[in-house]
């Protein structure tokens, strides 16, 4: 009888790929985890219990066929593992790196629930597709037939790119318009290299280009080309613009120099990772070197800002969050990484105003908080502790309070574009269809600030809906 290759979770402990020391990783913007060696990936994959009802799969937004690609990896059938993995995910090696697995697939792994430690699904997913790239298995698509229909996509983030990939595979003519100079959206200019190295994103952009997708970069829709022109030019238009309006703080002193937005700070740092010269960095405006940095916020953007500041050579980095550690929205894994790198978290601390000298920020006035009774949603609201205020010294304050959608109907002169009361585009569940004929929307601009994996899911679902529409139209024309 063949040897049972799986269910090794009792004999084999959970193990992640090697993590670089905090001292080493503070010196650069490279990723902090090494790659699994083949034997280690096989060993870790073999821990999977091959559940009949795999909760990891149902809690993965893409419903990746995780047990199958783990089994294929454990038995050394890597090319098939890659084929299975990429069948449901446009960017498996990106999700393997940056999905919050503890809240998605791994958090629902049955052996984790039984106390054995989750299968390292993300790390194996990354290993499979990185290996596929190394071995030349990842190839540009070559559609069997070219179709006459064209789709214009506004935004080259993961949502737009995932839709482009699916449509192009079916032979559709795809053009992506983006206001940045490089494609990738927040994968390129939001998420720092220590979580996702830039060449991992750039090789995906090139693959799409090699597959025949046209990129029109430095093109701000609404300014360089009108939305109406795009609708006239293409058979369908997908809005995949993400959310970029930073939430702000209106409080005494908030106009002082040295108080900056997280997205500006991270974009500049990411541009430098490409070797670009950036004036705002060279002038010191968006550069943490030699400064006491205070980051306000407790989400993943705040975590990226504190860790970027450390790498830029800040003298101290503090993170203020108004709730406690257990109630922060950011990933616990990232908090741990930040702490290892020297970031100090000031929990239950909220800004009240800013101190400055000659218009230049010198400190944050902080009020201490406690958690009060739970509100209607069950979440404890923070309350001020009177008399406990203090000033936290700072030469650079980074506001990482979240993002909201830009006002697209106004910016694009399209009052009829349907939006919700939060400003997100109103689109049908799954297809992404809006009330405007031929106009679809996907990713953060529909969901509000969310996750890469959800943007990929939306892009894929929307492409499928558009293809169905094109096919139905073609069938009618053929009759
Ligand atoms: C700092 C940061 C860290 C994050 N970390 C993670 C993480 O670790 N894991 C995770 O899963 N998610 C993370 N996220 C969230 C994730 O990046 C987003 O959910 C995801 O990128 C959304 O994809 P999208 O395609 O909808 O939009 P985006 O990635 O935002 O792409 C939108 C694109 O549209 C372009 N655009 C916008 N308006 C126009 C216009 N008028 N004309 C032309 N182009 C336009 C933009 O230039 C951009 O390239 C993070 C977000 C931030 C800000
Ligand atoms: S895409 Fe994300 S949630 Fe799904 S299996 Fe991969 S890491 Fe887990």
Image: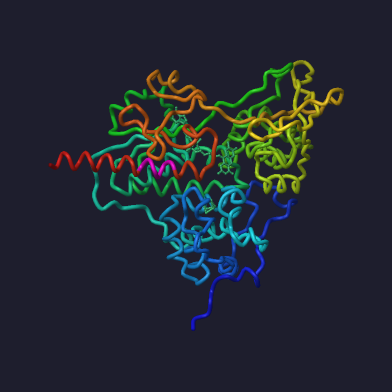
Quadrant in which residue 392 is drawn = top right
Query: In the orientation shown, which residue stands out farthest toward the right?
Result: 387
Residue 127: image location, x then y, percent: 54, 60
Query: In the orientation shown, which residue stands out farthest toward the left?
Result: 479
Chosen colour scheme: rainbow
| Front residue of this view, candidates 58 and 39 | 58
Q: Is residue 118 above or below residue 151?
A: below
The residue that appears at 68% across and 57% down in the rendered structure is 19
Q: Is residue 238 left or right of residue 360?
A: left
| Front residue of this view, candidates 249 and 13 | 13
SS majority, magenta: helix
- In magenta stretch: residue 208: no
| Front residue of this view, candidates 399 and 432 | 432
Residue 35: image location, x then y, percent: 59, 60
Image: magenta residue range? 458-463
Q: Is residue 388 left or right of residue 340?
A: right
The residue that appears at 44% across and 65% down in the rendered structure is 79
Q: Is residue 177 visible?
A: no
Residue 89: image location, x then y, percent: 45, 51
Location of the C terminus (image quadrant) = top left
Query: In the orientation shown, which residue stands out farthest toward the bottom?
Result: 1
Quadrant in which residue 250 is drawn = top right
Q: Is residue 170 visible?
A: yes
Q: Is residue 277 above or below residue 227?
A: below
Residue 12: image location, x then y, percent: 65, 70
Q: Is residue 426 left or right of residue 387?
A: left
């Amino acid at each position: 009888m063949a040897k049972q290759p799986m269910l090794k979770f009792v004999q084999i402990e959970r193990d992640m790929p090697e993590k670089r020391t905090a001292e080493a990783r503070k010196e650069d913007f490279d990723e902090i985890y090494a790659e699994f060696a083949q034997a280690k990936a096989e060993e870790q994959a073999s821990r999977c219990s091959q559940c009949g009802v795999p909760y990891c799969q149902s809690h993965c937004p893409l419903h990746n066929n995780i047990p199958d690609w783990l089994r294929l990896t454990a038995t050394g059938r890597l090319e098939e593992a890659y084929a299975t993995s990429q069948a449901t995910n446009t960017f498996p090696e990106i999700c393997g790196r940056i999905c919050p697995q503890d809240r998605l697939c791994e958090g629902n792994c049955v052996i984790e629930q039984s106390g054995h430690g989750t299968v390292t699904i993300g790390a194996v997913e990354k290993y499979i597709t990185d290996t596929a790239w190394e071995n030349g298995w990842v190839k540009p698509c070559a559609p069997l037939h070219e179709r006459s229909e064209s789709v214009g996509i506004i935004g080259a983030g993961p949502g737009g790119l995932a839709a482009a990939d699916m449509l192009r595979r079916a032979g559709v003519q795809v053009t992506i318009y983006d206001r940045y100079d490089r494609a990738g959206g927040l994968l390129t200019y939001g998420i720092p290299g220590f979580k996702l190295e830039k060449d991992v994103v750039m090789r995906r952009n090139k693959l799409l280009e090699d597959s025949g997708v046209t990129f029109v970069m430095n093109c701000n829709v609404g300014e360089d080309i009108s939305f109406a022109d795009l609708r006239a030019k293409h058979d369908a238009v997908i809005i995949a613009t993400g959310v970029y309006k930073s939430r702000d703080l209106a409080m005494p002193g908030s106009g002082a120099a040295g108080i900056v937005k997280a997205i500006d700070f991270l974009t500049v740092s990411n541009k430098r990772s490409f070797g670009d010269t950036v004036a705002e960095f060279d002038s010191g405006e968006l550069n943490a070197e030699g400064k006491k940095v205070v980051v306000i916020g407790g989400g993943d953007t705040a975590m990226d800002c504190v860790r970027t500041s450390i790498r830029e050579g800040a003298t101290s980095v503090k993170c203020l969050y108004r709730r406690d550690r257990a109630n922060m929205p950011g990933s616990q894994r990232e908090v741990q990484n930040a702490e290892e790198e020297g970031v100090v978290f000031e929990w239950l601390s909220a800004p009240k105003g800013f101190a400055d000298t000659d218009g230049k920020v010198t400190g944050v006035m902080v009020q201490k908080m406690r958690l009060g009774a739970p509100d209607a949603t069950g979440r404890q609201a923070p309350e001020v502790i009177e008399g406990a205020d203090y000033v936290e010294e700072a030469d650079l304050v980074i506001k990482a309070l979240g993002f909201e959608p830009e006002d697209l109907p106004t910016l694009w002169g399209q009052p009829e574009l349907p939006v919700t009361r939060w400003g997100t585009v109103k689109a049908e569940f799954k297809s992404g269809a809006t009330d405007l004929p031929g106009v679809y929307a996907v990713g953060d601009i529909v969901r509000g600030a969310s996750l890469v994996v959800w943007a990929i899911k939306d892009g894929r679902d929307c492409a499928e809906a558009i293809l169905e529409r094109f096919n139905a139209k073609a069938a009618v024309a053929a009759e």
